[in-house]
Image (cartoon, rainbow, N blue to C red):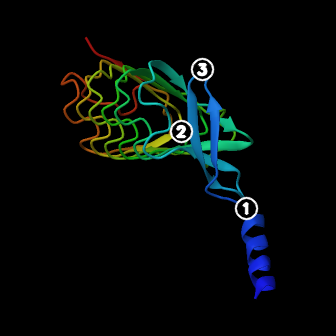
Amino acid sequence: MKKILLAFATLVLAAPNYAQDLTAVSPEGVEISFRIVSEYEKTCATMEEGCIDPATVGKVTIPDVVDGYTVIFIDYASFEDCASVTEVVVPPTIKCIDERAFYNCGLEVFTMLCTDKSNEDHVCEIIRSAFRGCDNLRSVTLADHVRYIEDYSFSSSNLEEVYSYIEEPFELADNSFNMSNPNLRELGDRKSTRLN
């Protein structure tokens, strides 16, 4: 019996820990927590429901690689209620910005960096309510690999500028910018939209 327990304990301790957390420090000095998405593909995501200290102030730049893992996902509620975060820059490796990722965040400026266009299969979607309740959000830059923006993604924001580097056809749900600035009429195939 002792041999069986010892063998089991050895297997458990030797097994890879896929729930392992990763951390990185942004250029601004902000510690960001990540979780491994795929050990095989070496990918990770921001930690669900709080990847940074909610008292963080100012700009946060999310890295594209953390300890050899490519950052592909801004997870559910990662920046929710971070009232003093005013600007976020995300890398071109991002494939998805999840529901409520920035819910009720103090964001004023959001920037998605463009890809190098070497991987045509690399696309990004912005999930429903990703930026809902970001009342201070004034400027958004959408990268070239965005292909879908779900409904209510930017609702309740007061957008004044939307810069789009999207060249390929993409899908914009009817209410993606619901309750945003009424002067924001259409994103479509324009390169940028600037409001009064």
Residue 37, given in percent of the width and then of the height, sits at 60, 54
- Residue at 70% of width from left, 56% of height from top? 39
Quadrant containing the C terminus is top left
Q: Nearer the viewer, residue 190 or 196?
A: 196
**177 displayed left or right of 29:** left
Element carrying mark 2: loop
Disc number placed over residue 145 in the picture, else none: 2
**35 displayed left or right of 11:** left
Disc number lying in front (3 or 2): 3
Element carrying mark 3: loop
Q: Amino acid at mark 3?
A: Gly
Q: Nearer the viewer, residue 149 or 49?
A: 49
Residue 78, given in percent of the width and then of the height, sits at 44, 40
* Nearer-N-terminus badge (1/2): 1
Residue pointed to by mark 1: 16
Q: Quadrant of residue 66?
A: top right
Q: Quadrant of residue 57?
A: top left
* Nearer-N-terminus badge (1/3): 1
**105 displayed left or right of 90:** left
Q: Amino acid at mark 2?
A: His
Q: Dot 1, crowdedness within 10 Å: few (<14), some or many (≥20)?
A: few
Residue 188 seen in the current view? yes
Instruction: State if disc 2 and disc 1 touch (CB < 8 Å).
Output: no
Disc number placed over residue 29 in the picture, else none: 3
